[in-house]
Structures are given as C-alpha cells and as structure tokens.
Amino acid sequence: MSRTFYLLTFLTTTTTALAQVVTLDQVDVVSEKEKAFSLPLDAAPATGSRLGLANRDLPASVSIITQEVMQFRGLRTAVEAVEASVGMTGGTQFGSIPNYSTRGFGGNNVTILRDGIRQNTASQSSRTIDTFLLDRVEVLKGPSSLMFGEGAVGGAVNYVSKTPDRTFRGEAFGSIGPWDSYRFGVGVGGPLAGDTLAYRADVSVNSTGGYQDRNQQDYFGFAGALSWKPTSRLTLTAFTTWLEDSVESYYGNPVIYDAVVNTTVANAQPEVRNFVSATDRMINPRVDPTARRTNYNILDNYADTENSFHRLRADLTLSPNLEVRSESYVATQLLKWRNLESNLWNPVSRLVTRSSFLHIYRDDVLVGNRTDLTWKGEPLGRRTRVLVGESFERNDQVRGGTPGGVPTTLSSVSLVNPDVGYGPAARFQKTSRIVVETHAFFAEATMDAAPGVKVVGGLRYDHIALQRDTLFNPTVTPATAFATFKKGYRPWTGRLGVVYEINRSLNAYASISTAAEPVSQLVGLNSTQADFSLQKGRQIELGLKGSLADGRVDFTLAVFDIEKNDLLTSTLDAVTGIRTSQQIGAQRSQGVEAAVALSPAEGWRVEGNVAFTDAEYDDFNENLGTGVISRKGKRPSNVPEWVANVFVSKRLASGLALSGGPRYVSDRFGNTNNSVVAQSYTTVDVSASYPWKRWIFTLRGRNLLDEDYEPVAGTTMRRLADPLSAEFSAKVHF
C-alpha cells in the first residue's frame, strides 16, 4: 500500500467525523493532565501483566510515559520517551537503528515490542517512530520472558498504540527547527455511529537535514483504529500502522589518537600503529573539531524501510467472572540498505581507512495469534484472578546481502574534506530464508493470600522451531550451497512475587523472574551454533511503591540482582592449546533505582529519577584470534553506573509555563577491554509555553550546555549527538 492511500483514507475519515461534530461547552482539562506524571501508579500497564493489575500492585518495575507527558516534555521519538524512564539509555548507533540499555544489559537483551508483539529483529521492531502515533511507552525492567517469550533478560520496551473512544477529540501540531527540520501531525477520533462504532486516525511527518553532512532523514507514519461493539459483551477492534523511513546514514566520526599502548604487556611503550580494541588503549583519543560535521559514508548510501503492523482484537465477556481475549496480527518489513559502515583512523598514513561496504535486504512477514481466558472469583474467600492462554507465531524472513566478488573496502580518504565518492555497482543477493515457528502456553494468577498480602505469579512454556535454508553462498560449491539448518528449543520461564500492603497508599514487594535467550538472535543462528543451548537469566527484585501527602507525591524504589549464565565464551585446551567455544560465561549486575513525582505547590510540577548499576562479566573470555583473554570483572560495553533525570515545570498566573531540567549519564566503556571510554555528559533542555484559546505555542531549547557527547558508546568511531539547538512549535485542539 502506498503513502497516498493512507493519506486519502485519513482525509476521508476526518471529513466524515468533522461533519458529525457537536459543539460543547469548553472544558479546561489542564489540571487533570498535570496529574499524568511519568509515575501513574494506578494505571494498569499491559507490559507488566495481562491480569489488569494496577502498577502499584505489580511485583515488578514498570515505567509508563504517557502521550500527555511526551507532548508536555517535547519528546519527539520513542527513544526520547524511553530515556525519560528510570535507568534507561538509548540512541542510534548503527545507521538508523535505535539501541537501548538498562540494568547492565543492552542490545538484544532489551526486547522491543509494538502493542506487546515482538519481531525477532531489532532493525524491524525498533525503527524510529514519532511519539505522536503512540498512546504511551511502557518499560518493564528485568527478565520478561513470561510476557513475551525468549529474550528480554535486561527488560522490555513496549510501544502502545492509541485506541478509539466515544468522545470526539482532534489535535494538530507543527514545529520547525535547525538544519531544515520540521515535524507535523494531525489526529482525530471519536464516535462514528452512535455508541457502537468509534475510530482513531493519526498521521505524522518528521524530516531533518541533520547536523552532519548528508544526513537527511525522512519519516512518515499513519496509525488507525476502528472499534465495533455489537453487543454489551463483545468488542472488536482493528488496528493498523504504516511506517516509512528513508535515511542517509551517519555512522560516526573516526577517533584520532597519537599512539596506542598494549594493556596486556607490562610496562609497554607507546606505539604508532592501528588500534586493536581487544588489547590496546589509545593515547589522547578525540574527534577532530574541524571534521565534526563530516560524513564519510559513500555518496549513494541509503537505508529505506517500509513497516506495517495490523491487529484484530476481540474482547468477549462470557459472564461477570469470565472473559476471553483473542488477538490476531500480521507485521511486515521491507528493508533495503546500502552503506559504508567503518571509518578508521590510520595514525601512520594519517588517512581514514574505509571498509564494511554492505548491501542488506530484508523481507519479513510475521503472523500470529494470542488468546487467553481470565477468570475472577473468591475461592475460600480469597480474591483470585487466573489467566491461561496460548499463542502461535510464524516469522518468515528472507535475508540478502552483498554479492560475492564485490569489494567491501574502498579507498582511504583525508580526515578533512574527504573525497568519499560512490560505492561499487552491486545488486542485492538473497542469501537465506529463515522460518521461526513458536507455540507458547502461559498462565498468570494473583490471589489475596492474607489480609494485605497479594501473591502474583506466572509460568510460560515455549516450543520454538527454526529452519534456515541457504539460498546462495558464494564461498561454497553449488552442490553444497543450498544447505538446511534446523534447531529447536523448549524453555520454561516465569515470575513469582509477593506484594505486601503496608497501608492503603504504600506497598512493598519481592519477586524472582527468569528469562531465556539464544546465543544470538534466532534469525542469525546457523549450523556452527547447533550444539548451544539457551542462555539463562534470573532476577531478584525488592521494592516499594507508594503515595504520600494525600496523593501529591508518588514514588518507587527498587533494588535488583540479575544473573545471565551460559554465555558463549572462548577457551583454550590446557593440553592441545586448541581454542573452542563453550557456554560457561556469565554476566551479573546489581543496583538500585528510585523515581519520584510531586506537586509541591500550586502550579508546580517536579519529577526525578536516578539509577545506579554495578555490572560486570564473570568467567567470560574474548577471542583474540591467536588466543583468548579473560574479561572477568570488566564492565559490559555501553553500561553507565549512573543515570539521572530531573524535570521541573511552573505554570504562572498569566498562563505562561516554564519547564525543563538536566539529564546525566556517567562514563561508559566502548569495548570489553574497558580501554575505550565514552565520557559522562549532562544535557539540559528548557521550554516556554503559552496558551491562546485552543492553541499552545512553545519555544524549546535542547542541549543548552552544547555538550559534545555520544548517546551510545563507540569504539573507533564516535556517533555524536546534535549540539545546542532551538525549535518552535504550535499545537491546537479541536
């Protein structure tokens, strides 16, 4: 389907709805929205449980960033929304793929979902999305395989779509900023035919030339939903989302340095040679300020993607105590990618070595169904809720890349004003087809075991079957090129927790949860990994959730301990000296997280969160090619010890609202050797908003300290964030 089709659909729906608008007395709901902090403890996050429990009654840490919070703070993308929650860091590291880290784990250890549905590949599920299309973003901390299957040792991020309601609501906004940036969106929703039909439709467009040279980024999104309630017991809701993005990729600036030192050799002297990440430390690493805006990618680079997500959900009430929910879904991805992805400084030639020319082709179709049955009752006088369900998914994925014989290393260029040229002429070559089928059975239950004591638990069984068919392999003879690889897994995962009500507004909890994930993403598994089992994750968490001062203060406090075992690591046979791979590695993290939201006085709003994480490898070795080296005691890459956010707003009597605050992220390492350091940074954003009739005008400043920082730690390249900037926006409700 084309972008034109969705725009015509949206405009037709909008015209029909506007014709039915009934003008009502204006209602000021600003005060209600100001209560929608980033700590809505009485909301029921679907990411934490399917039982419909309030956040304060969950024995787990769940952050909720609502649409009101996203608009009020000027959070433009899902990445910015996620970073507003406690202990989360995010950013775009490779080309155009966002990346998250929390509680000592990042990358594939953090599952990305759309309305609770998980695509296998991060490049599909975590594409940049405008927050205007979302109702909220939910973040579940720690192992979450109970909810979403294999993976998610560090946590899960869920992008939740807007749903129809029976009251007409319309809004539009637009903003302009530096580097030819603009963003606008229009959304409407309400009843269509009495109380039986309701709809929601939203369109967003986001474009920027980028601070870096040749870093044009264009994003288009359409989201629609239609709800039909034929009877008082049955509701059918259809959702659709269409996303397109086209990006000229910026992979980072090469880190220049004066020399390197081998950290594995005692009293080693500085050497002027190429940096080796596994063993070396750079002397005076830096980005040349004269090359700050330089993009070393080829002139004909691109990353073009079309993603769609379609769901049909049925909610049926069989009786006051029995409910059925069934959801069928289809998700598609078509990605075409042509980039040169490595820019390394050569201190001998004083040139930038460019390599890793890549063609990537992905054509994926995910289909599935999830059905569950919920029973509520009071056996033996104890309030109880039980959910049992099953799900089936089939993920059909075609992969392609650069054909054999095409050079992947191009000519070296100067650091300043490089002649980057064009990439080699090459067409996409389909290389493999991977089909993953998953059958799952799950159950959750909660019971008031004693006065003030609630037990919450769940169990899940997954039956995973993978088949990988090689379509083309230029490195083998035609007779063996079309190989088939099969692999299956049967993991059990779960969570058990106890919530104790200290008083009506304060709960304490304790829980243990588990997760399981393969040694690489399922789509990347091959015959060399056939003998490896799933990696296991376990978390113990203690916490408090509560409200003080007659509800004017909400807070959460959590202490956690996570272990991930059976990591794939390299070992050397003591007799033969042969290097082998074994699942004997481990990674651990412990920490504490706290968040608070309060209204200290009339017109004031204060929110803050802080997280401390102590993470390290245990019994983990890295392959050097000629041997192995232990990383025991080293901190995993891109894991900060401290993350903190503060947001303060004040609404004046004139209606003018001032808001903003700092964000702090401590040092992170860019490699497992812990010899490459991404420096800590503090950013400050502020805004001034003024309402006029149904309009709100906002002037917002970002990165006021003009920090030169890396959102995601790199090794030999630094992908720097935008410098100081300002934008102006206008929003109207109708």
Image: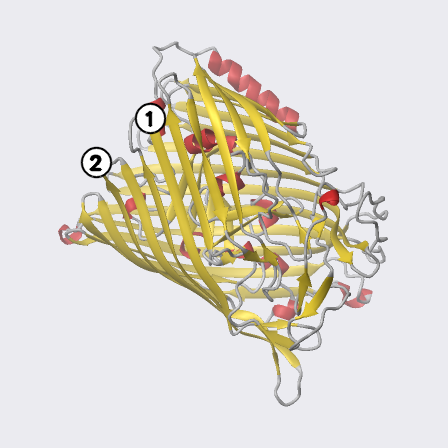
Check disc 1 and give the amino acid type: Gly
Q: Which x, y percent locates residue 161? A: 47, 35
How far apart are labels 1 and 2 at the CA level?
17 Å
Report if residue 46 is visible in the image.
no
Q: Residue at x 60, y 21 (%)?
A: 8
Q: Which x, y percent locates residue 693? A: 43, 12
Report if residue 353 is visible in the image.
yes
Q: Which x, y percent locates residue 150? A: 49, 58
Q: Residue at x 62, y 85 (%)?
A: 573
For the residues carrying marks 1 and 2, which lies nearer the camera in this image?
1
- Above or below, 409 relative to 702: below
- Above or below, 570 relative to 682: below
Of pointers 1 and 2, the one earlier in the residue sequence = 2
Q: Residue at x 82, y 67 (%)?
A: 477
Residue that numbered label 1 is attached to: 603
Q: Quadrant of residue 549?
A: top left
- Above or below, 75 relative to 669: above
Q: Residues within 10 Å of mark 2 (few under 14, many from 20)?
A: few
Q: Secondary structure at mark 2?
A: loop
Residue 107 left/right relative to 238? right
Q: Which x, y percent locates residue 241? A: 55, 34
Name the mark on residue 550.
2
| Frontmost residue, 240 versus 644 | 644
Q: Residues within 10 Å of mark 1 (few under 14, many from 20)?
A: some
Q: Secondary structure at mark 1?
A: loop
